[in-house]
Amino acid sequence: MRLFRGQMAAEDALARQANRVLLCEIDAVIMAAWSEARLGSCPPAIAAAAEERRFDLYLFAEGDGPWEQLAARKRPFVRLGGSHEAQLQQASDAIQRLIAPSAAERR
């Protein structure tokens, strides 16, 4: 639980400092999924945070999991494939689409 509390505190602190984009390697959804997969259950605090905390986009490299959990929770995600360079480009493109102003905002 100490790792979980530290992660949530770090996310909150960094989100206040971020300039529109905050990249995290792990979050409550991922912690919950790995807890279920490895331990057979998930602590209630992590499960609650997984439902309450929302990210705008998840990026998964080939072979990474548990993207199925994100699909089940209807969370937006992109699966990245190919070489490291291709995955970096796919990630960059996905983030640009997310943060680019819409046509209405540009007017």
Image: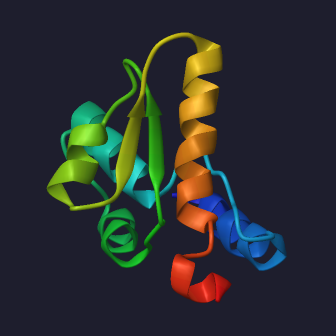
84 w.r.t. 41: above or below: above
65 w.r.t. 51: above or below: above
x%, y% of residue 84?
Answer: 61, 15
Q: Nearer the viewer, residue 67 or 105?
A: 105
Q: Nearer the viewer, residue 29 or 2?
A: 29
Residue occupying the point 18% across, 40% down: 40
Residue occupying the point 38% across, 70% down: 45
93 w.r.t. 95: above or below: above
x%, y% of residue 99?
Answer: 62, 66
Give the color scheme: rainbow, by chain, secondary structure or one colour.
rainbow
- The C terminus sits in image quarter: bottom right
Which picture quadrant has residue 76?
bottom left
Residue occupying the point 30% across, 72% down: 51
Which picture quadrant has residue 12?
bottom right
In this rendering, position of residue 79 left or right of residue 92: left
x%, y% of residue 35?
Answer: 32, 43
Q: Nearer the viewer, residue 42 or 81?
A: 81
Q: Residue placed farthest to the front in the image?
A: 107
In this rendering, position of residue 22 left or right of residue 93: right
65 w.r.t. 4: above or below: above
Residue occupying the point 66% across, 83% down: 106
Q: Residue placed farthest to the top in the image?
A: 83
In this rendering, position of residue 33 left or right of residue 26: left
x%, y% of residue 55?
Answer: 48, 66
